[in-house]
Image (spheres, helix red, strand yellow):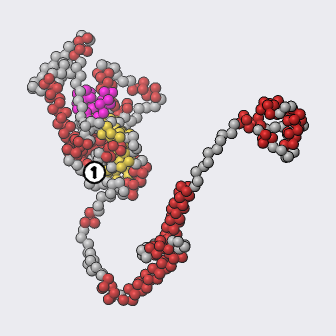
Amino acid sequence: MHITDVITAPWAILPEKLLEIQAVYTAHVRCEKIDIAAIEARLGRPLVNDQQGYQNVGGVAVIPVSGVIGKKMNMMTQISGGASTQLIERDIKAALSDSEVNSILLHIDSPGGTVDGTQNLSDVIKAAGEIKPVVSFADGTMASAAYWIGSAADAIVSSSDTTQIGSIGVVATHTDVSKAQEQEGVKTTEISAGKYKRISSQFAPLTKEGKAYMQEQVDQLYTIFVDAVAANRGVDPETVLEDMADGRVFLSKDAMQRGMIDHIATLETTISNMQKGVWPMSKPDPKAAEPVATQPVAEALTLEAAKERFPEICAALKAEGAKAERDRIASCEESSLPGFEAIVSAMKHDGKSTGADVAVAIIAEQKKQQASHLDAFVANAPKPVPHAAVDPVAQESSQEDTSLPIEERAKAKWDSDAKLRSEFTSFEGFLGVYKAENSGKLKISAMH
């Protein structure tokens, strides 16, 4: 990948990821060299992120597509990882030639990458699917250029509900470095031939004509992108434009509703299903297309023809059916209870109910009747008679301590009840009556 590709070329990638990449390469342009040795020393290990080919997992060739996608990647692959379309194509062709490989899985976790090289890889994947089944597995992110190549597989599986799918679109940027050069005392003069040769030069502000030229290129690439997705997913371009290609990123369930993916499953489940030929369906064996001898279609056997050709079998079946029906009716009658004869009669003649069905129906009717009787009982019950509230203070004061001598109890009552004192001329007269009352001979309440 050349430095000018990063700064000016169209990308099919998440915009925020492109900004990060351009920031790294802009620093590189300013001669802020990346010290590979220092990075390795800080990590305590060498930077080895080269694509290592595919892994054969029980007949499934798992090919990683991780990081930013480009033709070669070079330094970017070494520092942060990346996917070279040329190396992915190499691995696909190797897997197709491997007799121990039955299907291919593209294990994708990528924000996208350069447009250059993407369409060619998409075509390679589409052609590979005609030879061996190919599945794209989105594990984290499958956006933009990654979705472009992933959509070319026979099926797309997402690892979870949170996987990000989509970002179908193209972006190009223009960076004007003329002010920065001016501050550094540098001025670059370009000598070119051809009207559009340097119409969007980075050494001058972008002109209206330059912007229109760049927009035209982006629009054309976007159309190619949309048409490729439509062909890969088996829909028309209008459907892609309406449901998929507005530049947004969708989570898995939304992406599935939009027709962008086919399944949501773990990597283990996906590989297992591919080994079994579930996702996608195994490619047809060319030998199966050869014509084979077929048996003549048997003539439909009618009931009348069966009675005529197989009278003994028909008679046996009739007798068996009659016995089964008698047994069914008998079981219905055995489940009967007094008062529920109508239910039993209806069910034993319906040709399908059993004794157990009758019992359930009777229990349900019993519950219904009990509920009706309870409602009627409550409705006919006498209304409660209101009663006077009891004064807890008076009730408490009326209670006497029977453990005291009767004279002391009488004296306490005399002292606390003014009404008694108004009705008796003396305490001695009240005491006589009180003793008589406590002996059961006289009720003092009669005198009140």
Q: Residues within 10 Å of mark 1 (few under 14, many from 20)?
A: many
Q: Quadrant of residue 287?
A: bottom left
The magenta stretch spans which residues?
A: 1-21
Q: Is residue 389 above or below residue 191?
A: below
Please report the residue visible at 31 percent of the width from the left and 37 percent of the height from the top.
Answer: 249
Please report the residue visible at 38 percent of the width from the left and 48 percent of the height from the top.
Answer: 264
Asked if one can make out residue 313 in the rendered structure from this viewpoint, the answer is no
Total of numbered circles in the picture? 1
Please report the residue visible at 81 percent of the width from the left and 37 percent of the height from the top.
Answer: 400
Q: What SS does tag 1 mark? A: helix
Q: Is residue 50 above or below residue 317?
A: above
Residue 54, image x and y in percent?
37, 46
Asked if one can make out residue 236 in the rendered structure from this viewpoint, the answer is yes
Q: Is residue 319 above or below residue 200?
A: below
Q: From the image, which quarter does the N terminus lie in?
A: top left
Please report the residue visible at 40 percent of the width from the left and 51 percent of the height from the top.
Answer: 271
Name the one closer to the observer, 224 or 62. 224
Tell me which secondary structure the magenta stretch mostly adopts. Answer: helix
Mark 1 belongs to which amino acid?
A: Ala
330 within the magenta span = no
Q: Which residue in the protein does label 1 denote?
A: 128
Q: From the image, which quarter does the C terminus lie in?
A: top right
Residue 441, image x and y in percent?
85, 46
Name the one closer to the observer, 135 or 44. 135
Q: Quadrant of residue 52?
A: top left
Question: Quick check: 422 left or right of 435?
Answer: left
9 within the magenta span = yes
Q: Quadrant of residue 258?
A: top left
Residue 130, image x and y in percent?
26, 54
Residue 193, image x and y in percent?
10, 24
Question: Quick check: 322 left or right of 213?
Answer: right
